[in-house]
Image (cartoon, helix red, strand yellow):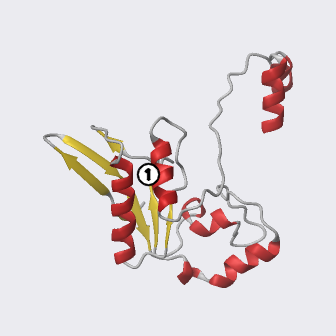
Amino acid sequence: MTEGEPFHTTAHRLRNEDALLPGYIYTTPPDLDFDPRTYLGWQPSPDVQACCGGAELPQSAVDRVSALGVDAFFPALMLGSPLGYRTEAAFTFWTPELFRHLVTASVQAAQERGVQCVVAPWIPDRMGNQHLVTALERLGAAVGFRGTEDFLQLTADNYADHVARMPSRKRRRLNLDR
């Protein structure tokens, strides 16, 4: 990930108690997965589909994002690990204010460096990460979309048979999600 400049935020408490919120500053548009414009429905061209774009917007909205230009979004701070597809803190201690302090310090330091936008694209739905979302929202962030990691262990020869064997409630949920 040589395109991004590491911009990690750390917290220390007592002896050997550390926390880390990874981040990377991009001065130019990186891979589509990390380009903040894709989360607003932007695509570089009609024949290229941004795989992580969270919004399906009318063409007029996409045109407005394009009209803003690159300078409205870059430099951009992407919080998390791009290779691990995770936006979360690693920590050896916990305090209720830990994520708020890490996020606030990251955003303030990034603004001092001229960062135009902050993106936290992959916040897993794990215990504690709601504090990360809340901290970002307190600083003015908006949740663009929400996804769930669902892994299926197929127990049949094909997907249709697998779904047909599920209890009706689970089958209904799966079909609605799909």
Which residue is pictured at 78% across the width and 65% down the height? 57
Q: Residue 86: horizontal and vertical position, in percent?
A: 48, 47
Which residue is pictured at 31% across the width and 38% down the height? 94
| Residue on which disc 1 sits | 81
Q: Is residue 166 above or below residue 80?
A: above
Q: In the rendered view of the protein, which quadrant contains the C terminus?
A: top right
Q: Is residue 109 above or below residue 21?
A: below
Q: Amino acid at mark 1?
A: Ser
Which residue is pictured at 64% across the width and 65% down the height? 38
In the picture provided, is 49 more to the left or to the right than 139?
right
Q: Residue 45: horizontal and vertical position, in percent?
A: 73, 72
Nearer to the camera, 74 or 11 = 11
Nearer to the camera, 35 or 129 = 129
In the picture provided, is 178 more to the left or to the right than 20?
right
Report which quarter residue 27 is drawn in: bottom left
Report which quarter residue 156 is drawn in: top right
Q: In the rendered view of the protein, which quadrant contains the N terminus?
A: bottom left
